Image (spheres, rainbow, N blue to C red):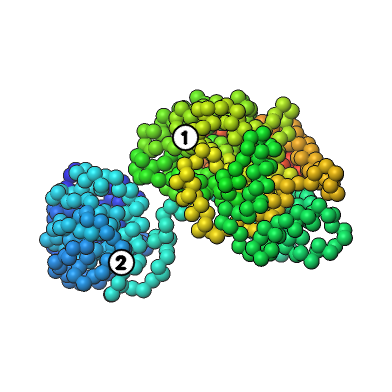
């Protein structure tokens, strides 16, 4: 219906929330409950002011209807008192009325369809008002989201838009116009600069289930229990996150001794601290600015620690490592975000596509959303213990290339939340696939110490890539990540980690150095603890026996709890739990009755979210619904950490299984 989207009752083809087919344009239909997609135009045109008006995106006049009778309930926008519309004003180059300075630092030379709407450009800080007789503008410097949408005389909402306008994402229209309306100049009302309408729209798309509404409710329940409230449980068990020390795991003595000595050097005089810990602390302090842990480090990290990481990697893989390819970070998460920032680019069909496993750790989906990249989820095979299949990668890649530019393949090994450990053959197949399809590999290997299942072993992507030889070892680009937060250390709060980049373009590497420099440096205390981890006690040193005993105790206990989790869950009809081969979590599938699914729908919740919220309210057990990680349609899961002490974990598993059985009976 070209050229007729503004009339009362006419349909509009612009696919924007609040301004779609079947709804009247609120600019010309004051009784409408729906808002114009350009928030700056939300104030309806007073019907007493003129007999007709033009939509700023159309040259065809549209009659103004009579005022609609007030609808039941309050309207989202109150009608203003009738006032006379301003007469058309000559528009200066730059998209704003004479004398109005453009506030948006716009520099393009395209035409803006709003620049000649008879008033100031909405992106120059003034609210636009449709005016009879408005014409398509001349050349403009405005870089509004609508810049380049030349009006050919027919409504461009009706399908004759220019290429630039067709590429336009409606959310950008709304956010940019909202920002302009909120920042309007003289005559505008004073209001907050940052509102839910003017904030970065990409932030709205960010979700992080690990600390989502269920965890928020768990914190509230803890507070209520402290205040003496009566609940059907005495404590809240937060099994939602892999925070080892919060679950009662003891720190590794040697790591804490080295860190304490660096933070408080006076402890060097304490004779109870072994000499090997003191020697390492002295070397680390000598590498710090002013020999103090309170000084900034170099942005890529303390050079000595980077050298120790390189030596650690060489001992692990049998492959040489260059300290200049190693960047210390605020945990592995920060390093992952930095690499994704380098890779995210383009718009429309050229936007970067990122292949991530489903289920996946929500850090990836959240970062991809924030960077306005495209998430391409490939399903892990649950029936094969969450194995990764190259055929599934090919399916997702082919589908993704229809609407974006896939450039990145993310692997989590061992898996989070699924706990699988990839075989060497699988890793080789993935590397060959990345080589054939020209993809950048990101290997999240933070759980490399957490291997429990018999026959399972950790193989780093770097080791396999190197042993495959040319052309793979010389061309496949790889970034791998490790952290002090997981493994047997569990030092989440110190926020220490690193990444190693392989085969990265030297010019891009320079940009990476610049990007990490913006944040000055990672926490020096975390770097120090990482330095102690990758330079552990050696045989014959005073701390060696204690260090190895503590490490073995932690890992063997985790292996026992992984087996216990699988056994208890699989005894319960309706709960299906794959072996926990590695990492710190189980991700069981649960069968939910149709009535439970319907009840969840009534509450506006995902079925597994409904289950997990009921579980929390009735037992105090906090787990994360599988919908927060992604799952196949029609299946339901939850993620639960295996970190609680063994006796508490056993009670937790039995209570959860009993609750599930009663839940199914209630909704059957």
Label 1 crowd (10 A; few <14 / some 14-19 / many >=20): many
Indicate left or right for 93 with 651 as reference: left
The picture places residue 479, in percent across and down from the top left corner, at: 55, 41
Using the image, determine if residue 18 lies above or below residue 311.
Answer: below
Q: Which numbered circle lies on residue 439?
A: 1
Which of marks 2 and 1 precedes in the sequence? 2
Q: Is residue 617 visible?
A: no
Dot 1: element? loop
- Report the front residue among 612 and 504: 504
The picture places residue 308, in percent across and down from the top left corner, at: 68, 47
- Report the front residue among 251 and 516: 516
Residue mark closest to the camera, 1 vs 2: 1
Using the image, determine if residue 493 lies above or below residue 481.
Answer: below
The picture places residue 114, in percent across and down from the top left corner, at: 22, 58
Q: Is residue 133 visible?
A: yes
Seen at 47% across and 42% down, the residue is 505
Q: Residue furthest right?
A: 271
Q: CA distance from mark 1 to mark 2?
A: 40 Å
Seen at 65% across and 32% down, the residue is 459
Q: Which residue is mark 2?
A: 103
Indicate left or right for 433 with 464 as reference: left
The picture places residue 112, in percent across and down from the top left corner, at: 22, 56
**Quadrant of the rendering where the C terminus is positioned:** top right
Seen at 49% across and 53% down, the residue is 515
Indicate left or right for 71 with 367 as reference: left
- Which image quadrant is residue 179 in? bottom left
Seen at 22% across and 56% down, the residue is 109
Q: Are marks 1 and 2 in contact (CB under 8 Å)?
A: no
Label 2 crowd (10 A; few <14 / some 14-19 / many >=20): some
């Amino acid at each position: 219906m070209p050229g007729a989207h503004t009339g009362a009752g006419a349909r509009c083809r612009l696919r924007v929330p609040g301004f779609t087919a079947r709804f009247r344009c609120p600019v010309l239909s004051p009784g409408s409950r729906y808002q114009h997609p350009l928030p700056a135009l939300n104030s309806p045109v007073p019907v007493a002011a003129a007999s007709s008006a033009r939509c700023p995106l159309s040259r065809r006049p549209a009659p103004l209807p009579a005022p609609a009778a007030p609808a039941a309930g309050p309207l989202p926008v109150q009608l203003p008192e009738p006032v006379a519309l301003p007469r058309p004003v000559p528009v200066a180059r730059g998209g704003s009325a004479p004398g109005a300075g453009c506030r948006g630092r716009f520099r393009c030379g395209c035409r803006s369809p709003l620049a000649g709407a008879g008033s100031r450009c909405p992106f120059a800080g003034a609210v636009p008002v449709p005016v009879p007789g408005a014409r398509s503008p001349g050349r403009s410097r405005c870089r509004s989201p609508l810049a380049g949408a030349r009006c050919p005389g027919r409504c461009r909402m009706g399908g004759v838009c220019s290429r630039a306008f067709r590429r336009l994402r409606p959310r950008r229209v709304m956010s940019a116009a909202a920002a302009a309306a909120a920042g309007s100049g003289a005559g505008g009302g004073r209001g907050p600069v940052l509102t839910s309408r003017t904030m970065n729209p990409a932030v709205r798309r960010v979700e992080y289930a690990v600390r989502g509404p269920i965890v928020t409710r768990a914190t509230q329940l803890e507070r209520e229990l402290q205040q003496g409230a009566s609940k059907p449980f005495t404590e809240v068990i937060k099994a939602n996150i892999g925070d080892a020390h919060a679950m009662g795991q003891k720190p590794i003595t040697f790591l804490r001794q080295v860190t304490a000595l660096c933070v408080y050097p006076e402890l060097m005089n304490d004779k109870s601290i072994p000499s090997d810990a003191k020697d390492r602390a002295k070397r680390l302090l000598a590498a710090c600015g002013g020999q103090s842990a309170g000084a900034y480090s170099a942005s890529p990290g303390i050079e000595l620690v980077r050298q120790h990481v390189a030596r650690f990697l060489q001992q692990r893989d049998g492959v040489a490592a260059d300290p200049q390819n190693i960047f210390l970070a605020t945990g592995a998460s920060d390093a992952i975000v930095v690499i994704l920032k380098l890779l995210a680019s383009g718009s429309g069909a050229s936007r970067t596509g990122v292949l991530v496993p489903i289920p996946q750790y929500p850090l990836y989906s959240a970062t991809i959303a924030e960077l306005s990249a495209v998430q391409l989820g490939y399903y892990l095979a649950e029936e094969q213990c969450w194995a990764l299949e190259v055929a599934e990668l090919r399916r997702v890649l082919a589908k993704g290339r229809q609407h974006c530019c896939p450039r990145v393949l993310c692997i989590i090994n061992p898996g989070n939340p699924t706990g699988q450990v990839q075989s060497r053959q699988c890793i080789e197949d993935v590397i060959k696939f990345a080589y054939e399809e020209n993809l950048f590999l990101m290997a999240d290997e933070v759980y490399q110490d957490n291997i429990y299942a018999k026959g399972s072993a950790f193989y780093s992507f770097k080791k396999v890539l190197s042993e495959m030889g040319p052309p793979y070892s010389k061309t496949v680009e790889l970034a791998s990540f490790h952290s002090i937060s997981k493994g047997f250390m569990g030092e989440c709060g110190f926020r220490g980690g690193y990444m190693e980049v392989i085969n990265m373009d030297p010019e891009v590497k320079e940009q990476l150095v610049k990007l990490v420099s913006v944040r000055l440096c990672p926490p020096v205390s975390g770097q120090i603890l990482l330095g102690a981890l990758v330079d552990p006690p050696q045989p014959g040193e005073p701390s060696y026996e204690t260090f190895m005993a503590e490490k073995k105790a932690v890992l063997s206990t985790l292996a026992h709890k992984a087996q216990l989790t699988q056994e208890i869950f699989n005894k319960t009809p309706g709960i299906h739990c794959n072996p926990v081969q590695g990492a710190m979590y189980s991700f069981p599938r649960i069968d939910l009755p149709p009535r439970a699914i319907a009840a969840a729908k009534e509450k506006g919740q995902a079925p597994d979210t409904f289950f997990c919220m009921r579980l929390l309210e009735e037992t105090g057990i906090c787990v994360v619904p599988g919908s927060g990680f992604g799952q196949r349609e029609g299946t339901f899961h939850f993620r639960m950490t295996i970190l609680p002490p063994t006796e508490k974990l056993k009670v937790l598993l039995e209570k959860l299984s009993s609750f599930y059985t009663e839940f199914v009976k209630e909704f059957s």
